[in-house]
Every structure is written in structure tokens, then in C-alpha cells.
Image (cartoon, helix red, strand yellow):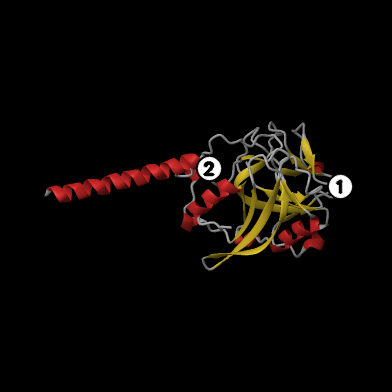
Amino acid sequence: MNMKKKTGLWVIIFTALAFLNCYQDDNKRYGINGDFGNTAVRKDTIDAVQLIIITTNGWNEVKGTMRCYEKKGHLWNLIFSNPVVVGINGMGVGFGIMSFDLENTPLKKEGDLRAPAGIFKIGTAFGYAVKNDVSWLKVPYLEATNSLLCIDDGNSSHYNKFVYSDNTRKDWNSHEEMHRKDNMYKWGLLVEHNYASPETGKGSCIFLHIWKSYSKGTAGCSAMQESDILKLLKWVDSAKKPLLIQFPKKEYDYVAKKINLPVF
């Protein structure tokens, strides 16, 4: 090989190494592991057809925006959007269907007044209406009677699960009452954070529900006005494998590029 060819080869090698280093530095800058941990989902393996995307302007921000998208063909189409609030203390990295190595960011913990950031499955709907009155729903539904509880005691075998207390043997010391004296849980959806195999202390009983107001955060859920949660409930469809994707906007933008999420 002559000198010119050798020089050209080294240029190519150094250029490739420089590109790789920039890529890794960019990942570090956003605090995200380049392979998204051991449960990464590639661009072409996300099979959700509906996305509920909530973003705020930072980890400690309360006010945000919810955007709902539906995939048609290979394109994500915006269906509707509305204002939301998250936890009183903002967001913390939660435990959903993908893992993220986020540096210098808060982690979601029990009682920290932060909503979980991440990608989560949507579970059952719930509300004060009797089941016969919600035949329009396309997701499972639990009637929030006076006996419906969500268990937040990490020592209970029912931790982070709904139970009807009138037919369940009690092994918990704390819980969330799902039929409140106000209307906050009149309509809602379960967010499957820390859900399949819940770990004590990492947060429980996370919902999308009705807010008190746009100026008041929640104890760790994401909330909106009643008309908006009803619009969401009429749209969301279990058959379309809906996901909640919730991040501060900077982190969302980075993740969106990696796994082909809507850009806005």
C-alpha cells in the first residue's frame, strides 16, 4: 500500500473514532446510557399505536402539556393536547418498560411528591360511575366504591395494586382511598409504574386523574381538568397498546430521536 492510501485509511479511522466519541459524549451530556440499559426497545420494535406524552420544562417543574398521538402507517398524528400538572416536586426517574441511566437526576421514591419520568404501560380505568354506565370505554374499568383501595404499604403482598377491602384479607397499614370526598378520582387511569414486580420504596399508586387546579401539583400523579380526562378516556384503547411517555422536554427530545417518537 502506498503512502497516500495509508494516509487516507488513517484519516477514515480517526474520523470514525471521533464520531463515536462525540456520540458517547452526547449521551453523557444528556445523562442517558447509549444502549438504554438492558431493556432497550429499538425504533422498529415499539408496537404501541397510541402515545400519551407529557412534558414539562424541567425536573422540578409542576406545569406541563399532554399530547396524545396515534400512529397511522408509519406516522404519528397529534389527536389532541391539553395542560396538565405533575407532582408538587416535579418528576423523578421511574420504573417502566425501558431502563434509563440518567445522571444527576432525581429518582422516583415513595412519598417524594414527584411524578415518575419514563415510559409506562396504561392500566385500568377507574371512576365513581357504575360499570354499566361506562360501556363506551375501550379499556378495563374498576368502579371506585368505598371499598376500593390502592395499597401503598411496601410490606403488603398487595403493594401497588388495587383491592376491594370487603373481600380481601388485610395485610397493609396504609392505603389510598379511591372513592374520595372530592372529585379528583371521579375519572382516572392507572399508570403502570413499578408495577409488574413492584419494589418497595420506589413509588406506588400512580394515576392520571382530575386536578385541583392548574396551579397545584399532585402527590405524584399527573392531573388535568375533568373535560380533558374524559376526552382521554373516550380515546384510549387497550387494543392499541397505549403508553404514557413522561419526561422533562430536554430528556424527551433526546429519547424521541433514539426510538422514533413524535417530535414537537
Assign a secondary structure to mark 1. Answer: loop
Q: Amino acid at mark 1?
A: Asp
Q: Identity of the amino acid at label 2?
A: Ser
Left or right of 20 in this view: 167: right
SS under mark 2: loop
Mark 2, Cα crowd under 10 Å, few <14 / some 14-19 / many 20+, is many
Lower sequence index among marks 1 and 2: 2
52 displayed left or right of 214: left
Residue 240, labelled with which disc? Answer: none
Q: Quadrant of the C terminus?
A: bottom right
User: Residue shown at 23%/45% (left/top)?
Assistant: 10
Residue ranking furthest to the bottom: 73
The residues bearing labels 1 and 2 have C-alpha atoms spaced at a distance of: 36 Å
Q: Residue at x 70, y 34 (%)?
A: 112
Whether residue 214 sits left or right of residue 182 in the image: it is left
Where 41 falls versus 168 (above or below)? below
Residue 250 position in % (x across, y down): 57, 47
One can see residue 68 in this view:
yes
Label 1 sits on residue: 182
131 w.r.t. 251: above or below: below
Q: Residue 158: x, y in percent? A: 70, 38
- Density class for disc 1 (Cα within 10 Å; few <14, some 14-19, many ≥20) is few
**Residue at x 43% of width, y 41% of height:** 25
Please tell me whether residue 197 is drawn above or below residue 263 in the rendered image: above
Quadrant location of residue 136? Answer: bottom right
Residue 195 visible in the current orientation: no
- What residue sits right under mark 2 in the picture? 99
Image coordinates of residue 246 in percent, x first then y, are: 62, 48
